[in-house]
Image (cartoon, rainbow, N blue to C red):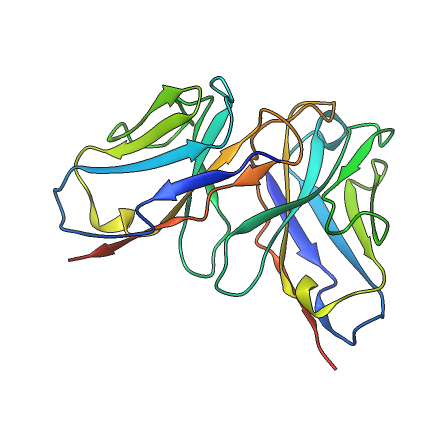
Amino acid sequence: QAQLVESGGGVVQPGRSLRLSCAASGITFDYYGMHWVRQAPGKGLEWVAVISSDGGNQDYADSVKGRFTISRDNSKDMLFLQMNSLRTEDTAVYYCAGLRVPTTIPYWFDPWGQGTLVTVSS
Amino acid sequence: DIQLTQSPSFLSASVGDRVTITCRASQGISSYLAWYQQKPGKAPKLLIYATFTLQNGVPSRFSGSGSGTEFSLTISSLQPEDFATYYCQQFNSYPLTFGGGTKVEIK
């Protein structure tokens, strides 16, 4: 059974950095294109970033471009999101999600992780 | 960016009711639309992809229709476990975008 488990969330001051992780199990991770999607408290869903199955291609939402970096380690079935220069508006639950499609071609998301909360506050 | 507008944003209904949620895209997206259900404190769950196709394990009371810019999700007979928030998502192009959500509550 496919399972994605995020970790690394917490409270951080504006301008600081945080690295999120997502551990995959029950799937052939290196067949999956992977994404980060976030949800601010009480708000809707916002796509953040995508990475291809081999890690060679990435794309980002304009709101995080230049500040966030998505990466993966297929040898460990792990996905990461390095978040720098954090802003209060980055406060959200961050979900990792994927699909068994190796490229960054747009698709839907399944499975999803349970999410990890990032709070940016002074 | 492609904007998705869901209506209504809030819906009050009774068990057994037929419910329809609409998602309108700011430009044509062919059939590149998915629907998700989200319950409080939980991750979204994929219900339907490519406008019509029911994800494995999703009850047949859920159905999707539409093309181009107008799409809908229908629940033929609302069950207690269906009270949740529903989101549409386009995968025609990046950035991937979601509708603002429709919260379905018990009347």
Quarter that holds the C terminus of chain B? bottom left
Q: Furthest-front residue in view? A: B26
Quarter that holds the N terminus of chain B? top right
Residue A105 is left or right of residue B45, and the answer is: right
Residue A31 lies in what quarter of the image? top right
Q: Up-down: is A82 above or below B32?
A: below
Residue B52 can be seen in this image: no
Residue A9 lies in what quarter of the image? bottom right
Find residue A79 and report its horizontal and vertical position in percent. Answer: 77, 44
Q: Up-down: is A84 above or below B104?
A: below
Find residue A67 and report its horizontal and vertical position in percent. Answer: 84, 54
Residue A122 can be seen in this image: yes
Find residue A7 and report its horizontal and vertical position in percent. Answer: 71, 59
Residue B48 is left or right of residue A7, and the answer is: left
Find residue B4 and report its horizontal and vertical position in percent. Answer: 48, 38
Residue occupying image coordinates x 32% and y 32%: B73
Q: Nearer the viewer, residue A20 or B69?
A: B69
Residue A14 lies in what quarter of the image? bottom right
Residue occupying image coordinates x 47% and y 21%: B50
Q: Up-down: is B13 above or below B75?
A: below
Marker count (numbered): 0
Q: Nearer the viewer, residue A25 or B3?
A: B3
Residue occupying image coordinates x 78% and y 44%: A78
Residue B4 is left or right of residue A58, and the answer is: left
Residue occupying image coordinates x 70% and y 29%: A32
